Image (spheres, rainbow, N blue to C red):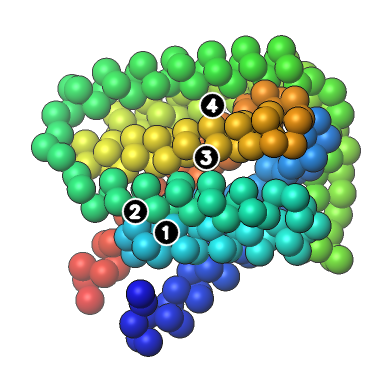
């Protein structure tokens, strides 16, 4: 259980996840879900504060976002899935094994290829057509409609794979472990929503998989630099 001193900080982390999830959303008609940037906040909290804070803030903060946006049928699953995601990352981030730079470069290249193929093949096969973007908080947002084409999925796939490889080339192996840990916890999130939507809600859940993969990628790209910057500031104090 958290101590009285940590409760305000835990509340702040939970609010951070909620606001980060609400501030930018893309509605996905096929599954009635939405793309968001909440993963970035979950990853930052998990890496900074550990498994308990990552699980609580990730699960509760994301569930609150579902309730505010009106996705009530997703809320119970979100509490569990995002809680597991944050908890697993917090656990793995605090247990860095001995690392070899060459090993991580090869592994990052393999992950990059898998990411590209997953995003492009699944996205271009199962989800092309119109979608909506909502910018801003509920009640004060702008909605934009656009068309998704296979070319967009190819670009997203290249960005995803290139970002993973570039991150490994330009950062220390320790950062590679954080990237891999976040990618694994993100995989659990993608799998969790797929199973819930496919077998509980009865949706065509594969349509949301590419969005969730990109959501994980965006979370990693935002969270890792922010986390490293905050750790540097901590060392200077």
Of the two numbered discs 3 and 4 in the rendering, the one whose residue sits closer to the viewer: 3
Near-viewer residue (159 or 84)? 84
Q: Which residue is mark 1?
A: 54
The number of numbered discs placed on residues in the rendered structure image is 4
Q: Secondary structure at mark 2?
A: helix
Q: Quadrant of residue 97?
A: top left
Q: Residue at x 80, y 57 (%)?
A: 70
Q: What residue is shown at x 76% (from left), y 55% (from top)?
A: 72
Q: Are marks 2 and 1 in contact (CB under 8 Å)?
A: yes
Name the residue carrying label 4. Answer: 159
Residue at (53%, 14%) from the top-left corner? 117
Which of discs 4 and 2 lies nearer the camera? The answer is 2
Query: Residue 158 at what x, y percent from top left?
Result: 54, 20
The residues tagged by marks 3 and 4 sit, at their Cα atoms, a distance apart of 21 Å
Drawn side of residue 171 relative to residue 218, left or right: left
Disc 3 designates what residue? Answer: 189
């Amino acid at each position: 259980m958290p101590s009285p001193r940590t409760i305000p900080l835990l509340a702040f982390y939970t609010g951070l996840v909620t606001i980060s999830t609400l501030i930018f959303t893309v509605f996905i008609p096929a599954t009635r879900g939405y793309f968001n940037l909440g993963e970035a906040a979950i990853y930052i909290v998990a890496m900074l504060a550990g498994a308990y804070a990552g699980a609580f803030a990730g699960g509760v903060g994301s569930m609150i976002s579902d309730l505010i946006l009106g996705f009530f049928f997703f809320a119970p699953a979100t509490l569990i899935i995002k809680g597991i995601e944050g908890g697993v990352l917090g656990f793995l981030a605090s247990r860095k094994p001995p690392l070899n730079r060459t090993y991580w470069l090869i592994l990052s290249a393999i992950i990059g290829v898998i990411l590209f193929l997953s995003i492009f093949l699944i996205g271009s096969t199962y989800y092309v057509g119109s979608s909506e973007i909502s910018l801003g908080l509920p009640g004060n947002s702008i909605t934009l409609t656009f068309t998704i084409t296979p070319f967009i999925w190819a670009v997203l796939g290249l960005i995803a794979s290139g970002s993973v490889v570039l991150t490994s080339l330009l950062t220390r192996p320790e950062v590679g472990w954080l990237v891999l840990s976040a990618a694994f916890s993100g995989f659990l999130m993608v799998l969790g929503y797929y199973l819930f939507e496919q077998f509980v809600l009865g949706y065509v859940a594969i349509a949301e998989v590419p969005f969730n993969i990109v959501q994980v990628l965006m979370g990693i790209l935002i969270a890792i630099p922010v986390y490293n910057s905050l750790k540097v500031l901590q060392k200077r104090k």
